[in-house]
Every structure is written in structure tokens, then in C-alpha cells.
Amino acid sequence: MAVSLVKLREQLAASPIVSPYPHDLAVAIICDTFRQASQKPPSQAEWDKLEKRLKTPLFREQVGMLAHVLVSSELRKKTVLYLTGDRTPQARLQQFLEEVLPLTAEMIRSNAFRQEEFLRRWLSVVGADIEGETEQQSKERLKALDYRQAVTDLRRIEEARKEEADRRTKMLQEAQQKDAEARGWRE
């Protein structure tokens, strides 16, 4: 049974997050989701290790947002259906948190594209199908939404603009210098 992103987003819009989930509560919600899927959730020591390994101040925000989307929509139920296979919950969480790394809770809450990216990344990690899309279409849409790639592209464009501006400034200075030299020779 495929997951409807439209339905998930409607459910999330109907129950906006007012304040961040306390980290312990968020961890408990995620662990309960793994338990419902008959998978052994990460221990507290494994959570601590994961937080240290990722070395990001966004870790707790992202864990809180994952907990919010799991309990505020049918995503938890769908996650339980798709959580199968040999991958450990720790491996899934690490992959997910690495992939959503630059996204803040505020971005996920307030930006439709970032929320869609966040949801799609989780669905990808658990191996869920998205309603109305082939696997290839889902990958292409996720690639198009990729915030990290957008930031990288923007930096590259900014650098190219700066290089072009520097090149033009240098050419202008050289032309002005040649003009001044020619004037000096004529006088």
C-alpha cells in the first residue's frame, strides 16, 4: 500500500507543532514506532553515540520533527508497515539524519518544499512507495527537492558571478591603464 504525501501533508497541516518535542519524548516516540514494527529500537547509549557521530546541533531538532510527523499523521502506521529487512533502526536513523542534515525544524514547519523533502527522505529510508509515483519518479522528485544540492548550486553560481565580475573589473582597469598610457604618450 503506497503512501499518500498529499494526505500526510494535510494531516500535518491540521496539527501544527506549537513547541518542540522534548528530546526524551521524541526518542520514545521513535523507539515505540520501531517496537510496533517488531524491531529492536536503539538503546539510550546508541542514541547518544548517533548524536556524537553526526556532530550537528540540529540533531535534536530533527529527531523532534520526526517524532512530530510520526504522531501527527498516518506516517507512523505506514512506517510500521514498511519497516522490514535486515537494516537496523540505528542504520536507518543515521542515514535519515545524515540526509536531512541541513534542514532545521523551522524550515520543515514553514516551507512546503522542505517538509516534502523531509517526508520523502524518511519514506525512502523505510522503503515506502509513494502513491502515484514509480520508484524512479520518487527518486527524481527527491533529487529536485534536495536542499543541499540547491545550496551547492547557489554557491557555485555566486562564485561564477564573482569570478566574472572580477574578470570584468580587471579588463576595465587594464583598458583604463592603456588609455592613460596612450594619452600620456600623445601629450
Image (spheres, helix red, strand yellow):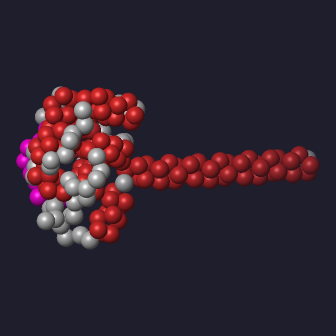
Secondary structure mostly seen in the magenta stretch: helix
- Do we see residue 93 in this rendering? no
Pick the front one: 92 or 182 = 92
Residue 9 in the image, given as x and y percentages of width and height: 15, 54
Residue 120 in the image, given as x and y percentages of width and height: 26, 55
Residue 61, compared with residue 35, is above or below; it is above
Question: Is 100 one of the magenta-colored residues?
Answer: no
Residue 81, compared with residue 72, is above or below; it is below
Name the side, left or right, on which 177 lies relative to 45.
Answer: right
Name the side, left or right, on which 97 lies relative to 20.
Answer: right
Q: Residue at x 39, y 36 (%)?
A: 54
Residue 94, compared with residue 135, is above or below; it is above
- Do we see residue 102 in this rendering? yes
Residue 181 in the image, given as x and y percentages of width and height: 86, 47
Q: Which residues are magenta?
A: 5-17
Counting the numbered discs, the total is 0
Q: Residue at x 7, y 47 (%)?
A: 14
Residue 58, quarter of picture: top left
Residue 37, compared with residue 60, is above or below; it is below
Q: Quadrant of the N terminus?
A: bottom left
Pick the front one: 182 or 32 = 32
Name the side, left or right, on which 40 lies relative to 155.
Answer: left
Q: Residue furthest left?
A: 14
Name the side, left or right, on which 176 lies relative to 81.
Answer: right
Pick the front one: 1 or 90 = 90
Q: Residue at x 30, y 42 (%)?
A: 90
Q: Residue at x 16, y 61 (%)?
A: 3
